[in-house]
Image: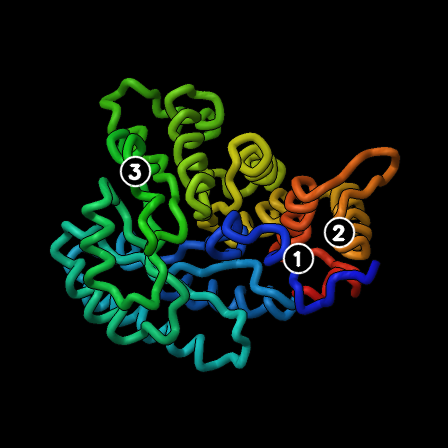
Amino acid sequence: MNPTPLSSHPRDVLLGAQAVRGLLPVCDHYSGVPVRMEKSLQLQAELIEEFGVCVLDVTLDCEDGAPAGGEIEQAQTVVALANNAYAATNSVQRRIGARLHAVDHPAFASDVEIVVGGAAQSLAYIMIPKVESVADVEIAAAAIDPRLPLHVLIESPAAVHRAFDIAAHPRVESISFGLMDFVSAHAGAIPHTAMGMEQFHHPLVVRAKLDIASACHAYGKVPSHCVVTELKDTAIIEQAARTAANSLGYTRMWSIHPQQIRPILRAFAPSTEELELAQRVIEKAHSENWAPIAIDGKLHDRASYRYFWQVLERAHQTGCTLPDTVQIYF
């Protein structure tokens, strides 16, 4: 039996309509202070050079990064930084996003005019915070260049309740969970410790995270886990990211400090053993035109092929070294 030609890409053969809309870097790094935004963009360029792939999105922040009364100046700074960074590299892998103000904020319209109007060609996506319903997504979609995917931030109990409807919107590419506002919205019913590492144990917080992840997976969107406030202990950061990935179903996570980036990459990368098995399964399955096979006395078919192909995709997204027989697909 002749193997499937290379033009029949495993992603197309195995995933089809089940494919997640976009393969996004597993780390989304937020920065709002001008000097830190500039350093974040430089770090992104260095990591692209190191790994050969964009393992890090940089989201330039017009919301929390803007001082009161300085919203227009902040938006102008974001435009300048995004355009300069995009123009300075020939790499099509570069990914820069911008977080605007919420759709009901007085600065939203000026953010759209300045940021989207001035830097759409340099941006990979727009983040919309404090999304409460599909109506908010519709407002953003109507105002923002249709070529730009929308990433939305869910931050309240009511918004979590509507997560499936929000995830179903065709312009939404990713949903993030806003932990701090979610906890605060419960009027003291959730203790402040749930803003820290207790977030992985408090039932209401865990339930919200699971609802968001489930909604995203139902509609082929990317669930993005919230930040952790630990900045120095890389073991704690990596364990938090590993829990988000392995126990809560998240395929992406926020970073707010450069020291959080590599622990997140390590946590979301497949283990050496899983990567080696994925390589063996996909190579043999490809050689058999995706018919059922046996490896180490265990049956594999299209269902496990899909799983192991996605392991290889995640390895690529996190900068893992892949053999030429697999790397050819990327």
**The N terminus is located in which quarter?**
bottom right
Q: Which residue is mark 1?
A: 10
- Packing grade of label 2 (10 A; few <14, some 14-19, many >=20) is many
Contact check, label 2 and label 1, Cβ < 8 Å: yes
Marks 1, 3: nearer the viewer:
1
Give the residue displayed 63% in from the left and 70% down from the top. 49
- Identify residue type, mark 2: Ile
> Residue at left 69%, top 45%?
305
Amino acid at circle 3? Glu
Q: Are marks 3 and 2 in contact (CB under 8 Å)?
A: no
Dot 1: few (<14), some (14–19), or many (≥20) neighbours within 10 Å? Answer: many
Q: Which residue is at the far left?
A: 106
Mark 2 sits on what residue? Answer: 282
For the point 82% across and 51% down, which residue is it?
A: 284
Q: Is residue 115 visible?
A: yes
The span from disc 3 to disc 2 (Cα, nearest Å) is 39 Å
Q: Dot 3: what SS?
A: loop
Q: Earlier in the sequence, mark 1 or mark 3?
A: 1
Render colour scheme: rainbow
In 3D space, how far apart are the residues under numbered discs 1 and 3 (Cα atoms)? 37 Å
Q: Amino acid at mark 1?
A: Pro
Q: Is residue 154 above or below residue 151?
A: above
Looking at the image, is mark 2 or mark 1 earlier in the sequence? 1
- List the residue tagged with mark 3: 155
Secondary structure at badge 1 equals: helix
Q: Is residue 1 left or right of residue 330?
A: right
Mark 2 element type: helix
Question: Residue visible at 32% across and 72% down?
Answer: 120
